[in-house]
Image: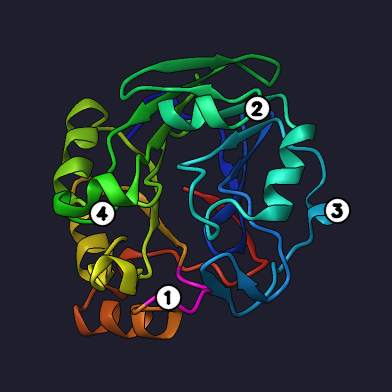
Amino acid sequence: MTSAMTAQATFTLIGGPTVLIEYAGLRFLTDPTFDAPGPVGNLTRLAGPAVSRVEVGHIDVVLLSHDEHEDNLDVSGRAMLDDVRHILTTPEGGDRVPRAQGMRRWDQAIIPGGATAVTVTAVPARHGPSVVKQLAGQVTGFVLEAEGWPTVYVSGDNSSVRKAGRVADRFPGVDVAVIFAGAARSPRLNDMMLTADAERALEIAARWPEATVVPAHIDDWAHFSQPRAAFVAAVADAGQTDRVTLLERGETRQAP
């Protein structure tokens, strides 16, 4: 755990992969998705956000794991980027998304303006098995660090335990792990698992035995093969219910 930690981060689950993280005086938002239910590109959204874009208010930094898929950046989410000063994403996303900073793995961005400067590191992630990585596209995770604040890992759409292990090697003192799960699958990619299921999420969490684990991306989309109820049941079957801090849609909680 981070030494001399004096503050707590606040996490609000908006829905899907979208989490508001209030941290070191700054407001971070992961993978913005605010569209209404219905078809979104090649995907189907089952429920709208639990908190509207207007209710979310000002955002300082968007942590965009990737921009190609509508369940990580939809039409409304893309529109909100015009109001955000710092947009951090993949190298390819940095070329496609106006004003975005593309970050290679282990690149760092220093975000000033809060209680203390926040260092954001882009960390390894893989969207599905390696055989489809060219089709699934680039994806990145992030680690947030600030003096006196918990170290926060955001997995992005990562399905690889090995990639998360590399993050743990570099950042063994993660205090909060926001792990995207849901076991997303696509017929276009032979129904291969593109995000972590409960088993892999728990394996990733085991890299940081003392961390608070916050699942995300387990709600709202039809292509999840292990949505919230199934995810919760699988965690319970594994005897690991106490290992995760499950936020309801729209719920705000401090951690750790």
Along the line of sight, which residue is nearer the eye, 33 or 30? 33
* Sequence-first disc among 2 and 4: 2
Quadrant housing residue 34: bottom right
Q: Residues within 10 Å of mark 2 (few under 14, many from 20)?
A: few
Residue span colored magenta: 218-224
Residue drawn at 60 percent across, 80 percent down: 46
Amino acid on which disc 4 is placed: Ala
Say whether residue 242 is magenta: no
Residue drawn at 37 percent across, 41 percent down: 139
Tell me if residue 84 comes above or below residue 119 in the rendering: below
Gap in Å between the C-alphas at discs 4 and 3? 33 Å
Residue bearing the label numbered 2: 98
Along the line of sight, which residue is nearer the eye, 110 or 135? 135
Gap in Å between the C-alphas at discs 3 and 2? 22 Å
* Sequence-first disc among 4 and 1: 4
Percent coordinates x, y for residue 146 in the rendering: 50, 22
For the residue labelled by badge 3, is the local secondary structure a helix, a strand or a loop? helix
Along the line of sight, which residue is nearer the eye, 255 or 17? 17
Q: Residues within 10 Å of mark 3 (few under 14, many from 20)?
A: few
Residue bearing the label numbered 1: 223
Amino acid on which disc 2 is placed: Pro
Q: Residues within 10 Å of mark 4 (few under 14, many from 20)?
A: many
